[in-house]
């Protein structure tokens, strides 16, 4: 599975940005997708996830109400719509996927996810 993240850039605080993650290869794994981020000098932080066959969508506490994850099945792509961006949202954003449906308690753990994209940098200026 190959994941290609895109859409990062520089945005002012309060602005919006949409990230995309295009999957190729064994795309059935697209059905379990997640976004993580990593700020300079910090560990990888869970942002959002959507599981195969699950109506629930999972968000990290710091992005709830501002970020939205969605799937475009026809294009094998997952999007992350980011609104009301804050300087603390500055990070490299990674998309990830795995074949088997992760249990809900493990979704926020980076080790749960098998395949990772290369990351796209989001910089939010104050």
Image: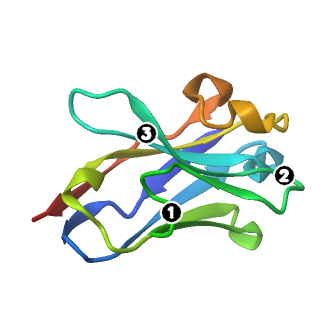
Instruction: Determine the CA span between mark 2 and mark 3.
Output: 23 Å
Indicate the position of residue 104 as horizontal and vertical percent values.
77, 39
**Residue 33 or residue 107, whichever sits in front:** 107
Residue picked out by circle 2 = 52
Quarter of the image for residue 7 reads bottom left
Q: Residue at x 65, y 31 (%)?
A: 113
Indicate the position of residue 41 as horizontal and vertical percent values.
22, 27
Q: Crowding near pointer 3: few (<14 within 10 Å), some, many (20+)?
A: some
**Residue 97 or residue 24, whichever sits in front:** 97
- Left or right, residue 117 beside residue 77: left
Q: Residue at x 50, y 69 (%)?
A: 65
Q: Which is nearer the N-term, disc 1 or disc 3?
A: 1
Instruction: Determine the CA span between mark 1 and mark 3.
Output: 12 Å
- Left or right, residue 40 beside residue 47: left
Instruction: Determine the CA span between mark 2 and mark 1.
Output: 18 Å
- SS assignment at label 1: strand
Residue 118: image tag: 3
Quadrant for the C terminus in the image: bottom left
Q: Which is nearer the N-term, disc 2 or disc 1?
A: 1
Indicate the position of residue 56 as horizontal and vertical percent values.
78, 59
Q: Residue at x 72, y 43 (%)?
A: 25
Q: Residue at x 84, y 38 (%)?
A: 101
Residue 20: image tag: 1
- Asked if the residue at tag 3 contacts the one at tag 1, i.e. Cβ–Cβ closer than 8 Å, the answer is no
Residue 89: image tag: none
Measured along the vertical axis of the image, is residue 37 above or below residue 14? above
- SS assignment at label 3: loop
Indicate the position of residue 117 as horizontal and vertical percent values.
50, 40
Quarter of the image for residue 54 reads bottom right
Q: Crowding near pointer 1: few (<14 within 10 Å), some, many (20+)?
A: many
């Amino acid at each position: 599975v190959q994941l290609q993240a895109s859409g990062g850039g520089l945005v002012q605080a309060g602005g919006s940005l949409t990230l995309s993650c295009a999957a190729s290869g064994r795309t059935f794994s697209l059905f379990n997708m997640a976004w993580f981020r990593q700020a300079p000098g910090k560990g990888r932080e869970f942002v959002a996830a959507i599981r195969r066959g699950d109506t629930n969508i999972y968000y990290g506490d710091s992005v709830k109400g501002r970020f939205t994850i969605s799937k475009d099945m026809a294009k094998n792509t997952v999007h992350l719509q980011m609104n009301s961006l804050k300087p603390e949202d500055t990070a490299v954003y990674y998309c990830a996927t795995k074949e088997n449906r992760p249990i809900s308690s493990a979704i926020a753990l980076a080790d749960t996810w098998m395949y990772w994209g290369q990351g796209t940098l989001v910089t939010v200026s104050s």
